Every structure is written in C-alpha cells, then in structure tokens.
C-alpha cells in the first residue's frame, strides 16, 4: 500500500531562519519521518510520500494550549 506522511502545526505563527512559516515546519516534520522510514525501517521509497498542511487541518480548535499541542502532529495515511 501507498503511505502518505502528513505534517501539521498549530495556528501560532513561526518565523525562524530554519522555518520561515508553519508550512516549512509541517513539511519538515513529515519529511523527517519519511527519511527515517526509508533509511531505518527500509520502506520502499516508491510507496511513500510527505505532505505538509501547516495549520489548515486542525483536529481541535486552537483555543487552548492542550488543543494546540494535539494539532502539532504527524499523521500516517494509508491508501487501500
């Protein structure tokens, strides 16, 4: 099966030299997991991809620190 690794952030803006926005941060999270799965777990690179969604797909409202923490995540999506 094909696996897509999706990176997510909360809605608090980030602006660092390494991550100019939440888009770069979410993509970096996903890419780090993909790299690990390919290099360490020996996943087939043809069956895996990374995507970054920043704060566009929250699981919870970003109204508390606990909710923001739950929105900062990496999610695995497996295609049938």
Image (tube, rainbow, N blue to C red):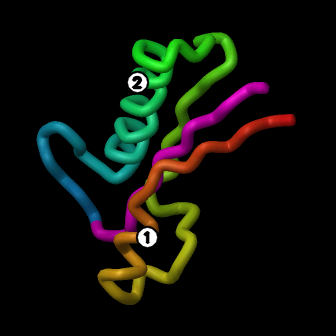
Given residues 21 and 44, the one toward you in this image is 44
- Residue picked out by circle 1: 70
Q: Judging from the image, what secondary structure is the residue with disc 2 in?
A: helix
What percent of the width, then of the height, locates residue 45?
59, 12
Q: Is 34 left, or right, of 1 in this rendering?
A: left
Identify the residue at horizontal 23%, vertical 57% (top origin). Answer: 14
Q: Quadrant of residue 73?
A: bottom left
Q: Residue reaching furthest right?
A: 80
Among the 4 quarters of the image, the one containing residue 19: top left
Residue 59 image position (x, y, % from top left): 56, 71
Disc 1: CA contacts within 10 A as few (<14), some (14-19) or many (>=20): some
Q: Residues within 10 Å of mark 2 (few under 14, many from 20)?
A: few
Direction from residue 57 to residue 52 in the image, left or right: left
The quarter of the displayed image where residue 47 is located: top right
The disc at residue 36 is 2
Quadrant location, the C terminus: top right
On the image, the x and y values in percent for residue 72 come to 39, 61
- Gap between marks 2 and 1, in whole Å? 22 Å
In the rendered image, the residue lying farthest to the front is 41
Instruction: Spot the residue most to the left.
Output: 17
**Can residue 47 be found in the magenta stretch?**
no
Q: Which residue is pictured at 78% across the width and 26% down the height?
A: 1
Residue 78 is tagged as none
State yes or no: residue 7 in magenta.
Answer: yes
Q: In this picture, which residue range is highlighted in magenta?
A: 1-12
- Vertical placement of residue 10 versus 41, above or below: below
Up-down: is 39 above or below 52?
Answer: above
């Amino acid at each position: 099966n094909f696996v897509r690794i999706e990176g997510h952030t909360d809605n608090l803006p980030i602006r660092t030299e390494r991550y100019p926005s939440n888009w770069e941060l979410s993509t970096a999270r996903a890419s780090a997991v993909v790299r690990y799965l390919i290099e360490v777990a020996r996943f087939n690179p043809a069956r895996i991809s990374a995507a970054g969604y920043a704060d566009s797909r929250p699981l919870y409202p970003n109204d508390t620190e606990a909710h923001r923490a739950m929105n900062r995540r990496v999610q695995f999506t497996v295609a049938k």
